[in-house]
């Protein structure tokens, strides 16, 4: 039963207010993409022990999608941010580096 | 025998007697008794039978760790199985019955299993019941099922009431013993919201039983004073009978409060589930005493030393007249002293340690109690009750030395901190060599959202065993917890004298070198009958992981979840594997701490408030006119409208005929209605639907398909363009919410720069399908909007007033008939329906339900999401290529549909199926072909997706997905039925009726 701060409402939302949406920062591949690219987009997911980026929706609240960066093993939440971005904000990445030096996730580090 | 003592009993009120029954026998107790203490007061030591060998089982403990004393409580709709006698407070009129015995508690036929115990070793079920295979199904499994399980499942609906309660606190203290109370003192005036919970009805825990002194006063007095002080603090709430059941992520805690259990008839909820969000959690959950493993340690009368003391001090009940204490630590000496002081016999204290005890040892000897040092119990005598023990040297293999007559054996193998709550959310443990127990590792605490430790532990739960250490540790932990929760901690100074105590000595088996014969009589798990020899056998057979051994032997899998047996079991396993205990580790502690009722989990969510029911504006009318309801999502829709004396089947057939021949009305209000608006709305819908929506003209409608990104068909419906930048998307009734969410997801997370706004307007409109050859006539009679063929052609829509009611009419048809779907504002729904019924009378109007709708669409070969689709079907399978744009570069699902498997010519495709004999094909039946697969099953080449009796054609019609189906028109397929016979059906065009679509376009 996590609590995550909804970056739109600014409130600490209980998990009962939220719906999980899987891994964040997927790049969509449509027609014209290779089999490998499409497979990666549709099926291949990070499954880290440690730093992870996820999509969540404040479904029983404001209805907005947002992203959360958290640690899957300690449940520490590094931050939440708008879903309308293609990469984690620089400041957040800095925060994570302070807490988890040397972290990497997908193309980010 | 066990009996009530003349004096004592700090928790019972001797002025208030209560009567209750056990197995039909009337018994008496006092207010404040637990069922266990009241049973013992009435000399009822035997309370149940063990699971596997049906051995007699007596009360062992006095708290939540009790493995044996499980009873049925109440009867009828108040029946409750598996109630623990030690945690059940007795009340006037309580009815209890023992479990797991046949035919009676005193004489049990299953006890013969015990004689066969040689042949029922660990993993017995796995070993014995595998061969020969057929016997498993017909002999073994029915037998095991018959004897499996404890208690009986209630037969009636639960007549009790339950509720949920939400609490948000800064600091939650779990445990109201000395440690919890000392820690709570640090929160007085801290400005924090604090909740202190205690699972029993009394504050103070064990210290008052042990006769401790705190701050120079008797523990009872100190507790009363401190509770009053805490109660008076405005920021602190104190609750008894509230157990911390589980600790979860980010400070979420489940509490289980027993409100009505001990006061039936008080019209209170039975249990309350507390859903607590705490800033910080301090657990002060104490410790549980461990049994010792000696032969016959399961004979009724062998009890935990602390329990024997509890019954005497708390309830004024003696467990027996002659108590032998057997121990590896000083604490059990208190039991000997308590019993002696009560005027009872204590023939001996058998201390496994060569050096014996500290100050308590001298006290015992001064009281005239014989202390045997370096000794153990070779064997307990007795069957349904202890009659004596044979002593032996601790070293050696257990040659009996002396027999001592007794009726109680009070054993103590040391104490284990209750680390469950600490461990639930990831707290790790340390092995404490000195005390031989696991305690919380403060370096590896459960962490919260900010990465902080959100659980801390105080007192004996933290490994502080003697009271002097408990108060010091609890004060420090309390102050730290208040600070961690962001408060200003009060100074806490509580003093208790240190005692002179000798160190405990780990004793995992008694005697140390016990021979096999003895080891097969040493119980670890009393409820599941797991013995030392079973764990050793498991190790010998290669079960090296503690988790595997647990499952192989069922050690710790009973309802007490190993509270007594766990540490002893893993010590035995470690010894057998010749490795240190921390290397073996523990099994996982999972919530809840003790079982909580299913009723508490459900709370108020039952019957009509289980989930909200969605009703259309015409719901009441339908209900009054014979609606046979079916659930569609959270909606209720009329399946059909039964006339007096009519069967459901007949009603459906009549409704179809009436609609095809005259006039039918369908309440289509549940249909999803999503408004998509904005400059980019057309572009957006082109991505969502497989066909082109941006080219749709204002005033026109188009049927569209929606797929998921992997290509599978997920929803369908008619889209109407309301204006240049506004579309109304109809979805399936069940799909409205998730299609709305689907749209939002793409708009918010992929195309967030597109200017589109989506609103779910489903409940804003009542929608009525006016269907049949007389549809136009009835609307013209009502007057207003021009509904003529020229003004409102097929697949067009128009807005205006009908019978004075604002309306939007869509000329769309899901039945193949002349059809108008008319949307009116929801609050006009019933009025509009009434007018249609009234005006339609002369045309033979009748309402029809969802089943008639299904039959009519099937006659027309229209697909239904959820029938023809199941999440693995793409539009191409359903011959819907005409609705998939070839011009669009992209739409959701396009790339998915290009995958090799999706373009495979062998995919099953939609066809019609006509049974040769006219009967109705079974729903979901498979068509078989020659040969069989690797598992010996017939090869299958297709399946039925929709099947009905068509009143229009007066025969069975069906649709199905068949391999190469469209190329095999006229071929006959065989569909085996569950009864062994087969039906044959011919592949045909899925459109059974009005192939050219003449009826709808008039």
Image (spheres, helix red, strand yellow):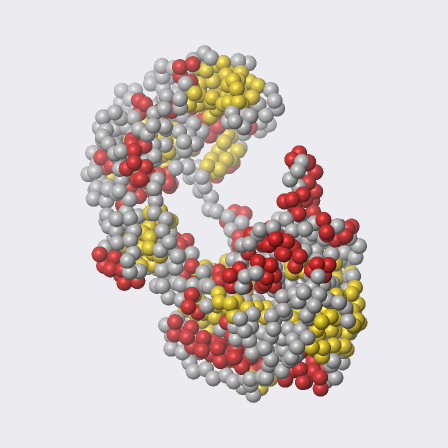
Q: Position of residue B974 (x, y in %)?
A: 53, 17
> Where does the image place residue B972, in percent across and percent down from the top left?
49, 14
Judged from this view, the residue extending furthest toward the bottom is: B216
Number of numbered discs visible in the structure rendering: 0
Q: Is residue B934 among the parts visible in the rendering?
A: yes
Name the residue: 50% across, 71% down.
B462
Which of the image's four quarters has the C terminus of chain B? top left
- Front-most of residues B352 and B724: B352
Residue at (71, 86) in percent of width and height:
B366
Q: Say which of B266 and B476 sits in front.
A: B476
Lateral position of residue B818 relative to residue A94, left or right: right
Q: Nearer the viewer, residue A76 or B726?
A: A76
Q: Is residue B843 visible?
A: no
Quadrant where the N terminus of chain B sits is bottom right
- Most foreground residue, B676 or A44: A44
Measuring from the top left, give residue B120's x and y in whole percent.
70, 49
Q: Is residue B122 above or below residue B463?
A: above
| For residue B344, side relative to residue B258 (left or right) | right
Occupied quadrant, residue B98: bottom right
Residue lying at 80% horizontally and 54% vertically, measured from the top left: B107
Where residue B707 appears, x then y in whole percent? 34, 33
Question: Quarter-wise, where is residue B979 in the image?
Answer: top right
Taking the image as shown, residue B968 lies to the left or right of residue B11, namely: left
């Amino acid at each position: 039963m996590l609590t995550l701060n909804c970056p739109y409402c600014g409130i600490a939302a209980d998990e009962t207010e939220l719906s999980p949406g899987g891994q964040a920062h997927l790049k969509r591949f449509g027609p014209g993409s290779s089999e490998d690219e499409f497979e990666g987009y549709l099926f291949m997911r990070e499954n880290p022990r440690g730093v992870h980026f996820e999509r969540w929706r404040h479904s029983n609240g404001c209805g907005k999608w947002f992203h959360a960066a958290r640690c899957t093993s300690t449940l520490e939440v590094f931050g939440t941010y708008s879903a309308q971005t293609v990469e984690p904000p620089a400041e957040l990445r800095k925060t994570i580096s302070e807490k988890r030096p040397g972290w990497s996730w997908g193309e980010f580090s | 025998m066990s009996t009530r003592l003349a004096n004592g009993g700090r928790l019972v009120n001797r002025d208030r007697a209560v009567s209750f029954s056990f197995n039909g026998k009337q018994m008496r107790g006092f207010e404040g008794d637990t069922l266990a203490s009241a049973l013992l007061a009435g000399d009822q030591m035997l309370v149940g039978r063990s699971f596997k060998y049906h051995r007699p089982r007596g009360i062992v403990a006095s708290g939540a760790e009790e493995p044996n004393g499980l009873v049925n409580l109440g009867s009828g709709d108040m029946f409750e199985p598996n109630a623990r006698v030690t945690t059940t407070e007795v009340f006037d009129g309580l009815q209890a019955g023992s479990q797991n015995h046949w035919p009676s508690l005193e004489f049990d036929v299953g006890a013969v299993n015990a004689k066969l115990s040689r042949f029922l070793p660990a993993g017995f079920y796995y070993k014995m019941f595998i061969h020969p295979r057929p016997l498993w199904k017909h002999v073994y499994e029915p037998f095991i099922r018959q004897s499996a399980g404890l208690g009986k499942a209630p037969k009636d609906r639960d007549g009790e009431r339950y509720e949920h309660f939400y609490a948000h606190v800064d600091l939650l203290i779990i445990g109201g013993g000395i440690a919890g109370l000392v820690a709570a003192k640090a929160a007085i005036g801290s400005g924090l919201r604090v909740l202190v919970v205690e699972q029993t009805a009394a504050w103070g825990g064990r210290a008052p039983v042990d006769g401790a002194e705190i701050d120079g006063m008797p523990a009872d007095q100190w507790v009363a004073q401190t509770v009053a002080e805490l109660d008076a603090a405005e920021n602190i709430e104190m609750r008894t009978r509230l157990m911390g059941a589980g600790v979860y992520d980010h400070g979420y805690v489940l509490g289980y409060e027993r409100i009505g259990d001990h006061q039936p008839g008080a019209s209170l909820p039975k249990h309350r589930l507390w859903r607590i969000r705490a800033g910080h959690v301090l657990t002060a959950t104490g410790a549980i005493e461990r049994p010792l493993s000696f032969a016959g340690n399961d004979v009724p009368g062998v009890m935990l030393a602390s329990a024997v003391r509890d019954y005497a001090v708390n309830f004024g009940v003696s467990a027996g007249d002659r108590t032998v204490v057997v121990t590896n630590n000083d604490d059990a000496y208190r039991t000997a002293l308590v019993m002696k002081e009560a005027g009872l016999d204590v023939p001996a204290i058998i201390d496994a340690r060569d050096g014996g005890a500290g100050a308590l040892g001298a006290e015992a000897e001064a009281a005239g109690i014989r202390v045997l040092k370096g000794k153990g119990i070779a064997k307990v005598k007795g069957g349904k009750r202890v009659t004596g023990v044979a002593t032996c040297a601790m070293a050696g293999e257990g040659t009996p030395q002396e027999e001592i007559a007794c009726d109680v054996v009070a054993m103590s193998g040391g104490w284990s901190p209750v680390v469950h709550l600490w461990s639930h959310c990831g707290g790790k443990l340390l092995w404490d060599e000195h005390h031989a127990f696991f305690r919380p590792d403060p370096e590896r605490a459960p962490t919260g959202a900010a990465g902080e430790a959100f659980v801390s532990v105080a007192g004996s739960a933290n490994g502080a065993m003697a009271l002097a250490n408990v108060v010091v540790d609890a004060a420090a932990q309390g102050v730290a917890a208040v600070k961690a929760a962001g408060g200003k901690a009060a100074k806490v100074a509580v003093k208790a004298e240190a005692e002179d105590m000798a160190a405990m000595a780990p004793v995992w088996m008694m005697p140390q070198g016990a021979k096999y014969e003895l080891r097969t009589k040493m119980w670890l798990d009393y409820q599941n009958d797991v013995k030392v020899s079973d764990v050793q056998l498991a190790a010998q057979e290669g079960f090296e992981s503690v988790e595997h051994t647990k499952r192989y032997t069922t050690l710790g899998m009973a309802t007490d979840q190993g509270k007594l047996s766990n540490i002893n079991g893993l010590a035995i396993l470690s010894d057998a594997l010749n490795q240190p205990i921390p290397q073996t580790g523990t099994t996982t502690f999972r919530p809840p701490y003790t079982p909580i009722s299913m009723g508490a989990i459900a709370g108020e969510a039952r019957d009509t408030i289980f989930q909200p029911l969605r009703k259309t504006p015409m719901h009441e009318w339908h209900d009054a006119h014979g609606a046979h309801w079916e659930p569609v999502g959270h909606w209720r829709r009329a399946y059909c409208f039964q006339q007096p004396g009519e069967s459901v089947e007949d009603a459906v057939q009549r409704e179809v005929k009436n609609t095809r021949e005259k006039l039918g009305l369908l309440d289509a209000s549940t249909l999803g209605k999503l408004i998509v608006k904005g400059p980019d709305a057309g572009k957006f819908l082109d991505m969502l639907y497989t066909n082109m929506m941006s080219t749709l003209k204002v005033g026109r409608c188009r049927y569209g398909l929606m797929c998921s990104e992997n290509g599978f068909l997920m929803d369908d419906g008619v889209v109407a363009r309301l204006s240049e930048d506004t579309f109304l998307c109809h979805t399936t009734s069940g799909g409205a919410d998730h299609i709305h969410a689907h749209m939002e997801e793409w708009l918010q997370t992929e195309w967030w720069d597109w200017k589109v706004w989506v609103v779910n307007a489903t409940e804003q409109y009542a929608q009525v399908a006016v269907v049949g050859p007389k549809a136009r006539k009835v609307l013209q009679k009502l007057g207003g909007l021009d509904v003529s063929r020229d003004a409102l052609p097929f697949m067009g829509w128009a807005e205006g007033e009908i019978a004075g009611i604002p309306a939007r009419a869509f000329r769309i048809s899901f039945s193949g008939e002349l059809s108008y779907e008319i949307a009116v504002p929801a609050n006009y729904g019933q009025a509009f329906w009434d007018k249609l019924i009234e005006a339609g009378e002369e045309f033979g109007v009748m309402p029809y339900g969802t089943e008639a709708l299904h039959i009519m669409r099937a006659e027309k070969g229209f697909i239904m999401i959820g029938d023809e689709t199941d999440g693995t079907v793409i539009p191409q399978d359903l011959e819907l290529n005409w609705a998939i744009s070839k011009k669009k570069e992209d739409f959701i699902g396009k790339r998915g549909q290009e995958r090799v498997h999706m373009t495979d010519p062998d995919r099953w495709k939609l066809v019609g199926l006509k049974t040769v004999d006219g009967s109705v094909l079974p729903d979901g039946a498979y068509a078989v072909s020659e040969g069989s697969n690797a598992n010996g099953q017939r090869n299958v080449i297709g399946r039925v997706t929709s099947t009905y009796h068509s009143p229009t054609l007066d025969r069975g019609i069906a649709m199905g997905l068949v391999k190469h189906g469209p190329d095999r028109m006229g071929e006959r397929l065989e569909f085996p039925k569950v009864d062994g016979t087969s039906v044959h059906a011919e592949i045909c065009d899925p459109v059974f009726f009005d192939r050219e679509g003449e009826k709808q376009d008039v």
